[in-house]
Amino acid sequence: MQNRVKYYDRHSSGCPDENRTATDTSEKNTDEPMVDAARLLEVLFEDGSSRPTLRWIRKMQSQRKIPYYKIGHLVRFRVSEVQEALSQKCHVRAA
């Protein structure tokens, strides 16, 4: 029996693609490890003083601005996919 993984991205209509499995080869970065929200913040923002909170990640997730995977009740992210989504969606304005 295959482990079912629900994949969510910013283009989905609110329903996960139930047909995607953990062994799908159609994913771009299947060999990249998945990380939790706390580790994602550490990787994306090395400088601890300017790092956003976990609440910010959860908000971006709930608004479907960043792609994420649900494995059972766990939420996991692929760093490269999140970096790509943030570079397309989030811009820092110069002062």
Image: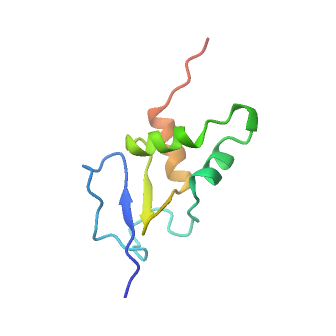
The N terminus lies in which quarter of the figure? bottom left
Viewer-proximal residue, 78 or 58? 58
Residue 41 percent across, percent down from the top left: 63, 46
Q: Is residue 61 left or right of residue 45?
A: left
Q: Quadrant of residue 16?
A: bottom left
Placement of 57 over or under 24, stated as above or below? above
Which residue is at the far bottom?
Answer: 1
Query: Is 50 in front, or is 55?
Result: 55
Q: Position of residue 60 (x, y in %)?
A: 45, 40
Q: Quadrant of the C terminus?
A: top right
Residue 78 vs residue 6: left or right? right
Which residue is depicted at the point 64% across and 54% down? Answer: 39
Q: Position of residue 13 (x, y in %)?
A: 24, 49
Q: How many marks?
A: 0
Which residue shows up at 49% across the image and 51% down it?
81
Q: Residue at x 64, y 44 (%)?
A: 44
Type of colouring: rainbow
| Placement of 51 over or under 95, stated as above or below | below
Who's the residue at 36% across and 45% down the image? 10
Q: Where is residue 83 shown, x and y percent of the image?
A: 54, 45
Image position of 70 with respect to 60: above or below: below
